[in-house]
Image (cartoon, grey):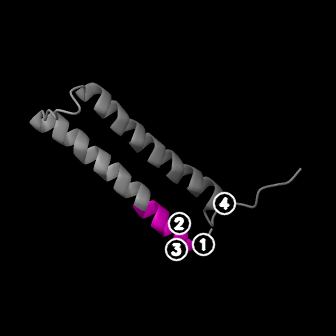
Amino acid sequence: MNNKLRKVLNYRYNAEIQDALYKIQCYSEQELLIPEHPDITAEVDKLLQKIAEAEDKMAVMELHYDGNVAEKQVL
């Protein structure tokens, strides 16, 4: 994976994380109730899932495509 692609994906995943964190902050600080989403707990749970998925993707990308990682051994 080239550096530009990795950089773009990192921006994407970080944007997803920041978006979810901001929404959670809005729910908790302003106690927003949105008519379509009366179950705030479920909405926050979905947002936490988005954060976890984005962080997992970043970790996998770093593990497999980081330039500092040694070549994988083929058995």
Q: Label 2's element?
A: helix
**2 or 4: mark nearer the eye:** 2
Query: In the figure, is residue 49 to the left or right of 68?
Result: left
Q: Is residue 49 magenta?
A: no
Report if the CB atoms under discs 2 and 1 are less than 8 Å apart: yes
Task: State the CA–CA distance, disc 2 to disc 4.
Answer: 15 Å
Query: In the figure, is residue 65 to the left or right of 9?
Result: right
Task: State the CA–CA distance, disc 3 to disc 1.
Answer: 6 Å
Report if the CB atoms under discs 4 and 1 are less than 8 Å apart: no
Indicate the amino acid at tag 2: Arg
Image point (53%, 66%), residue name:
6
Residue indicated by mark 4 = 69
Residue extent of the magenta highlight:
3-11
**4 or 1: mark nearer the eye:** 1
Task: State the CA–CA distance, disc 2 to disc 1.
Answer: 6 Å
Report if the CB atoms under discs 3 and 4 are less than 8 Å apart: no
Indicate the amino acid at tag 4: Val
Task: State the CA–CA distance, disc 3 to disc 4.
Answer: 18 Å
Report if the CB atoms under discs 3 and 2 are less than 8 Å apart: yes
Q: Residues within 10 Å of mark 3 (few under 14, many from 20)?
A: few
Q: Can you tell which mark lies on residue 4?
A: 3
Q: Label 4's element?
A: loop
Residue indicated by mark 2 = 6
